[in-house]
Amino acid sequence: MARVPMDETKVAACRALAARVADDVQRYIDGHTSVGVERTILRAFGVEGLGDEGAPLVNLAVDRCHQAGLLSRGISFFLGRALIAGAESAQDAAERIAYAPELDRGEGGPSADEARVALAAHTEEALARIDRARDQREALRARIAPGATPLKYVIVATGNIYDDAVQAKAAAFAGADVIAVIRATAQSLLDYVPHGATTEGYGGTFATQENFRIVRQAVEEATEQYGRYIHQTNYSSGLCMAEIAWMAAVERLDMLLNDAMYGILFRDINMCRTFVDQYVSRRIIARSGIVINTGEDNYLTTADAVEKAHTVLASQFVNEAFALRAGLREEQMGLGHAYEIDPWLEDSFLLEIAQAQLIRQIFARHPIKWMPPTKHKTGDVFQSHVHDAMFNLVGVTTHQSIELLGMFSEAIHNPMLMDRYLSLKATRYVFGAAKHLGDEIEFKRDGIVAKRAVQVLDEAHALLEEVARDGIWDAIGKGAFADVKRTREGGKGYAGVVARAADYVNPILDALEAPVKLNAS
Amino acid sequence: MNHVLRAYGDREGDGMVQMSFVLALPPSARAREAAKRFAEEHGLKEPLVATMEPCAEGYSYFVVYGHSTHSVDVSKIEVAEVRTGALSRDEIEHRISARLGRKIVVVGACTGSDAHTVGIDAILNYKGFAGDKGLESYKGFDAHNLGAQVENEELAARARALKADVILVSQVITQRNCHKDNSLAFEQLVTKQGWRKDVLLLLGGPRIDHALALELGFDAGFGPGTKPSDVASFIVDRLCGPQEREGAS
């Protein structure tokens, strides 16, 4: 089999360094919460709906507590007290928090423990809800198996959820295994989740719980119709990453774009906020058996793919370390990387193989997510199609797990039905024609591929040493990843981060953090 | 003098073109005939339906070749061209230092909801694009890349604070012409604030051309394939006067 040299000791050293980085941040996470986290908890308790002016009730309730400086005790504390005071349901309790003439300031009356007791049954029901969704999804997957890996992942992005559902089924017909409904641009910067089915969006379609449901129905119909399990994915990122994770868990999504650092680097979301939110989102994801897709591929769209290849690997170690601390299994970690080297560079194909194979070996049990060329695509669709074919060849040869298919119309428009069809057809050809190529060939011991793999791991190790020494906060400040620099208190959403009080109440998170026995899936 | 052209396939004037498209019909003899007539309606003579395949349930994908009956008289075409050919790096640096004697401040951003910085990064960042280094790499430019999802108001405020000579607006992802609305709104904002004449406004992106940019009130537009040196040359032409002629003092 085509393996590249891999120094096990060095890999172990990288993991140890990443663990140090993540442990440092985890201490911060464990002492903080955010408006996004607290809204998630309300949603978990079944709170839904909108206020008179269209704002989600969960925002109204959490914002009111936050503005009164009370959020350090956790929204659950106030929710529990409202139940004790006679609220009929969590919904009623949340409405009281949002609308009651006098806001309960948590003085006197029921204690934190009493609030927890009042929420015990609600907590159990919340967890049971996502457990049922997971079991339902697993049962369908057991009955109708997914296609062979690399799974063929395509994007639909019409802006209208009903068109997305049609296009999702068309893509399944043409051979897609994973359907992503790309989000409307800038949703990641909204500090609330839009509500209901949506038919207008720029650059994509809003992620809403109802939209998840509509596409879920389409992919399940396609699963039955084509006898192949079709996966659904969306974006748990941005200022609402934890809320989206919850909605996805309830609606049985299979995958989520979810990264510990993406929002910091590429959306200028505050790093404290992102670290706190990603942790809670991943606790939910871990429980619901969703596979995450991390976003390291993006690094190479801003930084050079040859010079900065090691930053992708270093970040994957960090993402893995964060994911482990949130209870994810390795089988749930779709660490991302990409085919973004300048195609006109001599031997660029060999450098791509080296990196893809190295990552495959280091993260042997992880469902690695392999992303197509975008940066060097032009409007020449014919050239672009060839470029994608080479990308596909690397994908199948190095046994990538999830492959987002390149589109020949990249850099022109969001993929049209025909574009996706041709991409799927070409990919089917390459994946079939070269199915066992990786098992048949070996790389020269001191050849270009082998040397490149050694170099990338060495450089990733050196970078992780720096990051571990400086701490991630300062490392990001120096532009260690993607050449993007961010400061600890800069970026969007910092005002929504709150230090937890000593008597902080969050029984949902407590339950998610408790060791659980999951059925092997 | 008229200069009439047809698409060139194998011989002058054969008008050969290929089309590919989808029709909402499953493959059949009727679908093939529909594709043929559809091509004919586009002016293709003797269309050959080279491919007909089902690409989704109830939809067929076609590739058609045919001789286009249409032609263009290129002598009648008038288009606004930004400029032809880029200046050399030395010429750019020389003209800025000799004629302006200070750095040209360039501020760029992807505005509105656009999160795709590929274009603005290629033009502004040191690394550049296709071996052509970005404006950051020139001594004569002070380049500020504000990145993605910058609101018009914010871009205007930052540009004024930095005393920008040039503002570069990038619009990559677009739906239902939002790139036009957004760009127009920016130009109007700058005009309303009363400093339009103090600044060069440049627009760039895959859907942008020079004519469109002018229509939207910008000074120039740069489409796909634009290199940093193209943009730099245009800026220098405008801000530092035209190229020195040989022999001119």
Image: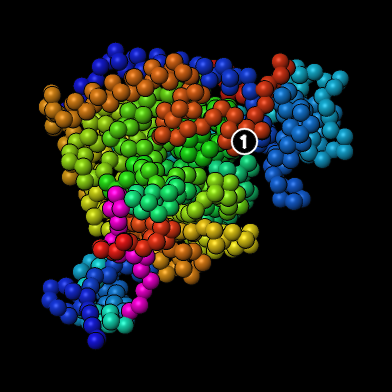
Residue in the foreground of this view, choosing between A480 and A135: A480
Q: Residue at x 80, y 26 (%)?
A: A81
- Residue A153 in percent (x, y) is at 37, 45
Q: Which residue is mark 1?
A: A493
Residue at the farthest front position = B249
Q: Determine if the magenta segment contains residue B85.
A: yes
Q: Could you say whether the residue bearing mark 1 is in a helix, strand or loop?
A: loop
Q: Residues within 10 Å of mark 1 (few under 14, many from 20)?
A: many
Q: Residue at x 70, y 39 (%)?
A: A58
Q: Is the image coloured rainbow, by chain, by secondary structure, or in one colour?
A: rainbow
Q: Quadrant of residue B224?
A: bottom left
Can you say which quadrant of the picture contains the N terminus of chain B? bottom left
Where A491 falls versus A187 (above or below)?
above
The span shown in magenta is B77-91
- Residue B82 in percent (x, y) is at 37, 65
Main SS type for the magenta part?
Answer: loop
Q: Is residue A377 visible?
A: no
- Residue B187 in percent (x, y) is at 55, 62
Q: Residue at x 38, y 49 (%)?
A: B97
Q: Residue at x 29, y 74 (%)?
A: B35
- Residue B170 in percent (x, y) is at 46, 54
Residue in the foreground of this view, choosing between A162 and A271: A271
Side of A221 relative to B153 (left or right)? left
